[in-house]
């Protein structure tokens, strides 16, 4: 832009782009917070999943709830869909823009607004990064319990939308248990306060329903998160086994014994080797599988459960049981676990991180099946997962440049879903449905079940303008299809 | 074991047929919270939900139970395997407890009811059996129908069967009471109290967990008052107030005759009903749409409104 032009714009406001939608959005926010350039649109056309990018319309970066309301109203008047977006680390394609929607990226709404110790909560904006929140709370003796492996980058708004979990959600519960109130803006621009700081807020549990709704009920603009007190004592055990079956049986044995540890994570040998090569965390590379188990609580009884877990491991043929002797050793082990996905980059450039849940007693059988499925489709699989709640994360590793490889990956993914459902499991434990698993929803739910999910959705968003084309299979939400079709085929289309 | 899409449980199918698709109906549990939500329309047919424990898998910490089962019967069965659920024990049925959605007065020890309902099967306004959620402890497959139905007071569907998460019963549970001890200070000092009840004068505390942890907590109590061990108290009765944990500090000056407050939680049991503002207009709108979507003919528990005490 020339200097003369810039001066002229400062004096007379943004020049008309010729597109009324863009002009109105820029007038409501500011020119520099509404983007439409190719680079931005291509970047925000994808998330961290393996699914094809979508096609975004204007990308807005609001800083206040009022601006979000304005965006919703402008989008509505132009009959355009809206897609909320956090850090874009979602793995189910939830943030992929379909049908050239207005994308609302909340990354500039990133303030920790208030810490209210008397009520045990903090008010935060949705763009706050998960780990930043916990770091902020550490000096006060608290943390935010959900700790997804992506916690260095993912946002609280994204955690709420996906009801995210993490290794330490076994004892403490996933995001839904750690959010007490939400301010949200619906697609028609209504501001709702859902839930509350009081013990049992009145009315239907709309807060509980909104968490995990993947951006399809509206956008979160403020969150009251629960503060979890840091525990005085912690014991971290590393159990080694010659195979994944023994590790999985130990996990179900611990649960069956009535112990709910803070975390129980299993890694198979392939991923353990990758992690060791990557960060040198102290894992044994000769073990067929390792189990990282952590108990925490008051100092006096902390060793009781740790000892019982050790014994259950030995009963299930553990070849070695190690207790982390120092905070450094413990931190190194967790660093290894949490960088597992980074570690696979040395092996192949791409991965598809799958996510299903099975009954814990079926873990060993389903794992065996997953290795067979990978062999059958000639793909490399590694397993690193939240074993304590039966949440499998098969990691399919590949090089996307290889012709035909994605077809094999998706075929293997489909078989993993079948194996999990056949074992009495469900489609997703924490990544959500997005565009990834829509077509499998009718394997878990009847048409009537899905119809009722659709009704729930319509109560918030009767015309399905918030993140259309996600979660429910297309046949069950006709309004979605309408919404996607109603997009004008011009500029951004 | 494959995920069961369509139930072939004849008991549930009979219940669905009883509910049918026409005429006002309401499900009668044990009537322990019958007045909640306002008076029921007189034309409503009263039905009982089916009862019985369908499947209990202690190793998975889940139980499938029909709605008409009493919480007492359920908990008696689970206790044999050292487990219980977050459902309150006050004489009611499982379906009633889920429909009402209130927690036990020992919520810190027992857990949150709304997180314990993993799957719900209910009969819809159209007389169909609908399921939401799933049998695993972790699940984000689709919209959270269990959370919508929990606490909906039977106005969106007639609860027939639920899958609940169970929890291990702690090794030790003991109760202590002292006059004049500051319950708010104790709440900060104790890591995991099972319950802290306060009537403005005396503080009654449940300590639960491993025996050694409870002993360590007893030692802490001594710094805060003359605590004596007491029998487990009965569940408080009266009107239920929902307050923020911080608001409880002001209770002694709130003009209440008598109260029992759940410190750290925010529930207050009082002799008079809580004055409360209406829902905001925007939330009310979603409520009305939700009711219209799930019960277009307004036949489920007509007259009752969620949130009316
Ligand atoms: C390496 C790696 C490891 C991961 N590990 C885990 C893990 O351990 N556990 C886990 O649960 N997940 C994990 N994930 C998935 C992902 O990080 C989480 O789902 C995360 O919560 C998404 O947050 P985000 O800010 O990136 O959201 P995005 O990807 O930007 O969006 C995700 C969804 O949320 C919606 N959304 C975002 N912000 C809002 C808002 N303010 N209001 C309404 N809707 C909104 C979007 O529309 C979309 O549907 C992992 C991802 C990666 C890449």
Image: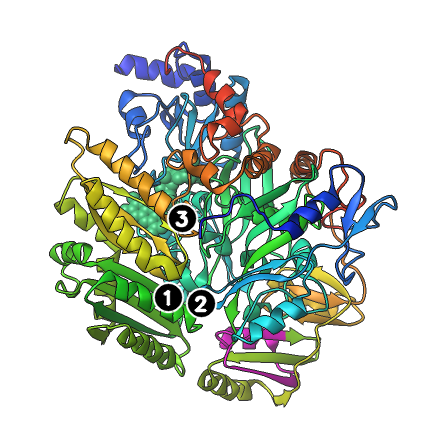
Within 8 Å: ligand 1 and the Cβ of disc 3? no
Please name the residue shown 14% across and 42% down the image: A348
Q: Which residue is mark 2?
A: B59
> Which SS class for mark 2?
helix
Residue B213, position as x, y percentages in the image: 46, 83
B268 is within the stretch colored magenta: no
B275 versus B217 height, above or below:
above
- The x, y position of residue A115, in whole percent, is 48, 57
Q: Look at 52% across and 48% down and name the residue there.
A: B133
What colour scheme was applied to this rendering of the protein?
rainbow
Q: Which residue is mark 1?
A: A252
Q: CA distance from mark 2 to mark 3?
A: 19 Å
Q: Position of residue B279 (x, y in %)?
A: 70, 44
Disc 3 target residue: A422
Q: Residues within 10 Å of mark 1 (few under 14, many from 20)?
A: many
Q: Do dots 2 and 3 share one subunit?
A: no
The magenta stretch spans residue B171: yes
Q: Nearer the viewer, mark 1 or mark 3?
A: 3
**Chain to which mark 3 belongs:** A
Compare residues B86 and A88 and report the one nearer the observer.
B86
- Mark 1 and mark 3: Cα distance apart in space: 18 Å
């Amino acid at each position: 832009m020339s200097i003369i032009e810039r001066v002229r714009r400062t004096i007379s406001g943004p020049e008309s782009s010729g597109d009324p939608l863009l002009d109105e959005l820029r007038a409501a926010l500011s020119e520099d917070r509404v983007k439409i350039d190719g680079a931005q649109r291509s970047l925000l056309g994808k998330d961290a999943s393996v699914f094809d990018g979508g096609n975004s319309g204007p990308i807005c970066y609001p800083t206040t709830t009022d601006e979000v309301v304005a965006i919703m109203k402008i989008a509505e008047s132009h009959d355009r869909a809206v897609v909320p977006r956090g850090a874009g680390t979602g793995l189910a394609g939830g943030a992929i823009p379909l049908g050239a929607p207005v994308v609302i990226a909340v990354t500039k709404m990133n303030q920790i607004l208030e810490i209210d110790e008397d009520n045990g909560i903090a008010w935060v904006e949705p763009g706050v990064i998960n780990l930043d929140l916990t770091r902020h709370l550490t000096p006060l003796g608290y943390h935010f319990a959900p700790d997804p492996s992506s916690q260095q980058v993912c946002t609280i708004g994204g955690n709420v939308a996906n009801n995210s979990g993490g290794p330490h959600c076994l004892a403490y519960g996933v995001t839904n248990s750690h959010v007490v109130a939400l301010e949200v803006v619906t697609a028609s621009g209504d501001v709702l306060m859902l839930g509350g700081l009081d013990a049992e807020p009145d009315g239907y549990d709309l807060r509980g329903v909104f968490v995990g709704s993947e951006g399809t009920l509206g956008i979160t603009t403020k969150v009251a998160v629960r503060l979890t007190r840091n525990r005085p004592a912690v014991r971290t055990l590393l159990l080694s086994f010659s195979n994944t079956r023994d590790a999985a049986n130990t996990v179900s044995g611990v649960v069956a014994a009535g112990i709910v540890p803070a975390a129980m994570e299993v890694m198979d040998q392939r991923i353990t080797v990758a992690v060791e090569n990557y960060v040198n965390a102290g894992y044994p590379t000769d073990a067929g599988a390792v189990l990282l188990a952590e108990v925490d609580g008051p100092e006096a009884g902390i060793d009781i459960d740790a000892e019982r877990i050790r014994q259950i491991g030995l009963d299930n043929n553990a070849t070695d049981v190690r207790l982390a002797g120092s905070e450094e050793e413990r931190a190194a082990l967790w660093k290894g676990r949490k960088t597992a996905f980074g570690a696979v980059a040395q092996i192949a450039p791409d991965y598809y991180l799958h996510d299903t849940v099975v009954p814990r007693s079926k873990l060993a059988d389903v794992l065996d099946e997953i290795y067979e499925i990978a062999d059958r489709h000639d793909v490399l699989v590694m397993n690193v997962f939240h074993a304590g709640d039966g949440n499998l994360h098969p990691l399919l590793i590949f090089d996307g440049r290889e012709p035909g490889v994605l077809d094999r990956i998706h075929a293997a993914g489909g078989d993993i879903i079948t194996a999990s459902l056949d074992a009495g499991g469900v489609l997703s434990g924490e990544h959500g449905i997005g565009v990834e698993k829509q077509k499998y929803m009718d394997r878990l739910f009847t048409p009537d079940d899905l119809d009722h999910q659709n009704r729930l959705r319509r109560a918030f968003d009767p015309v399905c303008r918030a993140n259309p084309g996600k979660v429910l299979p297309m046949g069950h939400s006709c309004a979605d299809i309408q919404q996607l079709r109603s997009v004008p085929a011009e500029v951004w289309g | 074991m494959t995920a069961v899409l369509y139930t072939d449980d004849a008991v549930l199918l009979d219940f669905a047929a009883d509910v049918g698709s026409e005429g006002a109906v309401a499900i009668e549990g044990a009537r322990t919270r019958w007045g909640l939500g306002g008076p029921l329309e007189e034309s409503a047919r009263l039905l009982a939900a089916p009862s019985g424990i369908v499947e209990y898998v202690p190793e998975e910490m889940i139980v499938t139970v029909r709605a008409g089962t009493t919480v007492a019967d359920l908990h008696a069965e689970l206790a044999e395997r050292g487990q219980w659920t977050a459902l309150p024990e006050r004489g009611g049925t499982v379906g009633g407890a889920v429909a009402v959605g209130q927690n036990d007065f020992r919520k810190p020890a027992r857990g949150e009811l709304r997180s314990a309902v993993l799957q719900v099967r209910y009969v819809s306004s159209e007389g169909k059996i609908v399921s939401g959620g799933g049998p695993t402890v972790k699940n984000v497959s689709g919209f959270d129908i269990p959370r919508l139905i929990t606490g909906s007071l039977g106005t969106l569907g007639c609860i027939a069967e639920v899958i609940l998460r169970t929890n291990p019963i702690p090794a030790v549970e003991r109760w202590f009471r002292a006059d004049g001890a500051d319950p708010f200070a104790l709440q900060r000092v104790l890591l995991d109290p099972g319950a802290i009840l306060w009537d403005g004068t005396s503080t009654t505390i449940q300590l639960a967990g491993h025996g050694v942890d409870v002993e360590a907590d007893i030692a802490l109590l001594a710094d805060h008052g003359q605590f004596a061990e007491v029998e487990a108290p009965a569940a408080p009765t009266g009107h239920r107030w929902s307050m923020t944990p911080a608001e409880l500090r002001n209770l002694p000056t709130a003009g209440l005759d008598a109260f029992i407050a759940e410190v750290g939680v925010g529930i207050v049991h009082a002799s008079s009903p809580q004055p409360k503002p209406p829902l905001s207009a925007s939330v009310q709108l979603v409520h009305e749409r939700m009711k219209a979507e799930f019960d277009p003919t307004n036949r489920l528990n007509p007259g009752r409104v969620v949130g009316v005490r």
